[in-house]
Amino acid sequence: MKRIFPLSVLAASAVILSACGFTPIYGQTGEGAIGGQLAQIAVSTPDDRLGYRLREQLEDAFGRNPALPVQYRLQTEVEQSRLPLGRRIDDTATRYQLTVTAKWSLTPVAGGEPIKGERTTTTTYASADQPYAAIAAQQDGEDRAAADLARLIRMDLMRVLAAR
């Protein structure tokens, strides 16, 4: 009896949700599924290391499928700033705050008004005395910022595409 009740509640919930027109936003198949639309977005980013990492993260987040025709073009502009935090006795920074802003524009290939947005993320990383360690720490901060921006932009686009 303890097993039958939860299963019957689950079955009843499935019937009710299917009747109300509920569509999961993360669905990958079906007419107008958001996941399928994301897979048809071609991404363009600045031609630098941070732009490359952002494009890579966005294509992974969208599940870009080169076999599908492109329905949208996403153009991004990226700006970053670095602020030193904390000071050592020799007046060098112990940490840096990296702020990255991405302005994006989603344009339908078939024509139409572009949808624009902007997202900003901030991350910190430690400064190191050794040059290689300092470069590696900065690149790690950029990678984390690109991953966070890709997540934020993906959520914006899912909201926009779901409203269409």
Image (cartoon, helix red, strand yellow):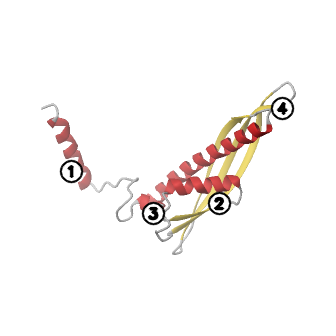
Q: Residues within 10 Å of mark 2 (few under 14, many from 20)?
A: many
In the picture of the structure, the residue carrying the numbered disc 2 is: 45
Please state which of the two labelled residues, at mark 3 or mark 1, is closer to the viewer: 3
In the picture of the structure, the residue carrying the numbered disc 3 is: 37
Q: Amino acid at mark 1?
A: Val
Q: Amino acid at mark 2?
A: Thr
Q: Amino acid at mark 3?
A: Gln
Cα distance between the residues tagged 2 and 3: 19 Å
Q: Earlier in the sequence, mark 3 or mark 1?
A: 1
Query: Could you say where residue 26 lies in the image, as x and y percent from the top left?
Result: 40, 53
In the picture of the structure, the residue carrying the numbered disc 1 is: 15
Query: Could you say where residue 39 lies in the image, as x and y percent from the top left?
Result: 47, 62
In the displayed orientation, state which residue is furthest to the left: 1
Q: Residues within 10 Å of mark 3 (few under 14, many from 20)?
A: many
Q: Label 3: state its secondary structure.
A: helix
Placement of 10 over or under 40, stated as above or below:
above
Residue at 52%, 64% (x, y): give it: 41
Position of 125 with respect to 3 (left or right) is: right
Q: Amino acid at mark 4?
A: Thr
Residues 98 and 105: in front is 98
Cα distance between the residues tagged 4 and 2: 33 Å
Residue at 35%, 65% (x, y): give it: 31
* Circles 4, 1 touching at the beta carbon (< 8 Å): no
* Circles 2, 3 touching at the beta carbon (< 8 Å): no
Residue at 83%, 32% (x, y): give it: 92
Q: Earlier in the sequence, mark 4 or mark 1?
A: 1
Q: Label 4: state its secondary structure.
A: loop
- Which quadrant of the figure has residue 46? bottom right
Q: Label 1: state its secondary structure.
A: helix
